[in-house]
Amino acid sequence: MALERAIPLPMIKKLNLVVMTPRWRRILFSFLLAAAAVAGLAAISSSRATDQTVSAKIAPWVVEHTANGLRAEFIVVLADQADLSGAALLRARLDKGRFVRDTLWNQAQTTQGPILQWLRDRGIEHRSFYIVNALWVKGDRAVAQALAARTDVARVEGNPRIQNFPQGLRAIESPSQPNSPETVEPGINYTHAPQVWATGHTGEGIVVAGADTGFRWTHNAIKPHYRGWDGVTADHDYNWHDSIHDSSGNPCGNDSPFPCDDAGHGTHTIGTAIGDDGAGNQIGMAPGAKCIGCRNMDEGAGTPARYIECMEFFLAPYPIGGDPSQGDPTKAPDLTTNSWVCPPDEGCSPDTLQSAVEGQRAAGIEMVAGAGNNGSDCSTLIYPPAIYDASYTVGALITGTDTIAPFSSRGPVTVDGSNRLKPDITAPGTNTRSSYNTSDDAYVFLSGTSMATPHIAGSVALLWSARPELRTDLEATEGTLNNAAVDINSSECGTGSPNSVYGWGRVDVFAALTSGTPTPTPTPTPPPPIRVSVSVNPTEISEGETATYTVTASAPVTRTITVGYAMTGTAANGTDYTLSGRPNQVKIPAGQSSATVTLTSVLDQVTEGTETAILTLQRGRGYKLGLNREATLSIIESR
């Protein structure tokens, strides 16, 4: 073969080698270069997507508190959570408790191993939970990102410190002896608990747990009712737990081995539930019940981890100095009273706490929760655990009346988009006299939904002691109390009954026990305060047209009221539209229930697109804000 012979083929195979012509080499090189570029772009895109996925799993609170190399506490929630639906098939409460505890425990044991090993290998502070399949971790941003990048982690949430009493408790001291002859406190009388006592039922056989600032177990009105006291010796195993591990200067220290109250709030609330010193201080609803407790606040400061730890202890209590592996669900309380909050706007995650609350309920433990003290506007009931369907939520009445306390938070619950009716029920909550932590015979007056809540916890204890068949059915228990409650109509935050101010009404535990017909109310129900709301008609106009905002009161006003408002939106008042009447106010005349403000839009030649004019009602004297406190008008550009 002559070397000069033309070779028509682009390639010559020789000795199993492929030889390319220069032209084909250029083509192949270009192809490979393009493929590498595409692969590189795909890798960059994938990396960005991964980064976005990781970032989405980390709560903004964690990002903020790990900036500039700072370390923070956070809750790492695992992707695999236990299925507790099987508990509903079990009738006996002990069976429910065992099933829920074992199911949750086994799920955590099965899934947490790899992440626990990862944390131990790096010497990172952590603590495991099982009532929610989650871990408390203390670390920096890199730790949070590494955990969020794991496929077995669902989210990384904050563990903020929440001060439950930012204004202090404002306790008013009381003599150690009640004003004779009224040895039974007015709030207790108003729920008709003494009539239940007369039937021979005082809460016997029921255990009430207090999740609070702790309690002074030696107090004369509490000691006889503490499950850890047999009349001779004290045994705090399974009866007390302290979730405060890192306080500084706290009067109870850390990990207190016996019940201790660092603020007084917990001693007061548990006293209202079960307290009686046997010497005339009948401060409690169910003096025949027993109590246990868990401190979930450091002088009023709670965290999600502390709240979860106490709920986990109540699910299956364990000995002092022990750990959850020793938990015994047969020693769980029947119900818990909870006068604490965890605001999402301060970094609390509502989803994680909800899982813990629902875990307790699945085990047959009734969780009674205060509505909060954010009133008096509608939809101010915004904090866990009160917002949950699984909580039995309590609003506060002015003691001795059927008038809602001004501070009591109202529903409906809109913060989670549910529009859920809350509170469920109401009870006395002002000037409540109960035990305090300063001495064994100290009593003070306090006001708040915190004081109303143990009235309902005690009511549940009384009802269960008299009707034990209800203990296994929380829905039936709540339904019995709700249906027997003294109906209090309100048009403040919706209409009808139940409603978002009083729920089903004032608790009447004697009526719940007997005929289901409420006993006569001692005082007439006063008229509700005037609520104002606003609407606009039409909701959309073109330039040059008019619309009318109507400010409506919940009832005809007895005297003229002036309602303030503010205008916002993309349209400018005075440039894009004008308003009738006096600026930023409208008067509803006496005897009428509404007034109007007319908006006239300006027809101009400026290209602006669709603009908005938003009228928002402002707080003022003589009225409260209703549900619809804002109305939005769209102004469409004329063409």
Image (tube, helix red, strand yellow):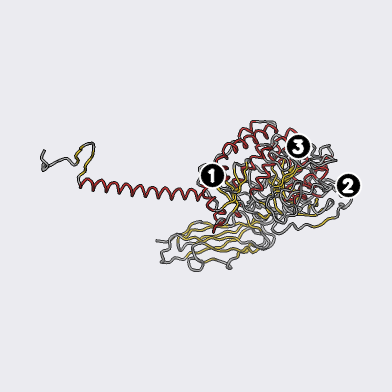
Q: Residues within 10 Å of mark 2 (few under 14, many from 20)?
A: few
Q: The C terminus appears in which quarter of the rendering?
A: bottom left
Q: Nearer the viewer, mark 2 or mark 1?
A: 1
Instruction: Identify residue type, mark 2.
Output: Ala
Tell whether 285 sits left or right of 472.
right
Q: What element carries label 1?
A: strand
Image quadrant containing the N terminus: top left
Residue that mark 2 sits on: 279
Q: Position of residue 350 (x, y in %)?
A: 60, 48
Q: Using the image, determine if residue 524 lies above or below residue 509.
A: below
> Of discs 3 and 2, which sits in the foreground?
2
Dividing the picture into quadrants, the one containing residue 588 is: bottom right
Give the Cα distance between marks 3 and 2: 26 Å
Which residue, given by chain and number where applicable, does mark 1 sit on? 154
Q: Where is residue 216 in the image (x, y as percent from the top left)?
A: 79, 49
Q: Where is residue 305 in the image (x, y as percent from the top left)?
A: 64, 48
Which is nearer the N-term, disc 3 or disc 2? 2
Q: How far apart are marks 3 and 1 (CA)?
A: 39 Å
Q: Which mark is residue 464?
A: 3
| Label 3 Cα neighbours within 10 Å, binned few <14 / some 14-19 / many ≥20 | many
| Left or right side of 468 for 180 | right
99 or 245: nearer the viewer:
245
Depth check: give the residue in front, 579 or 624: 624
- The mark nearer the N terminus, 3 or 1, is 1
The kind of residue on which mark 1 rests is Ala
Q: Which of marks 2 and 1 is nearer the N terminus?
A: 1
Residue 552 is marked as none
* 443 sits to left or right of 596: right
Between circles 3 and 1, the one closer to the viewer is 1
Looking at the picture, does residue 509 appear above or below residue 564?
Answer: above
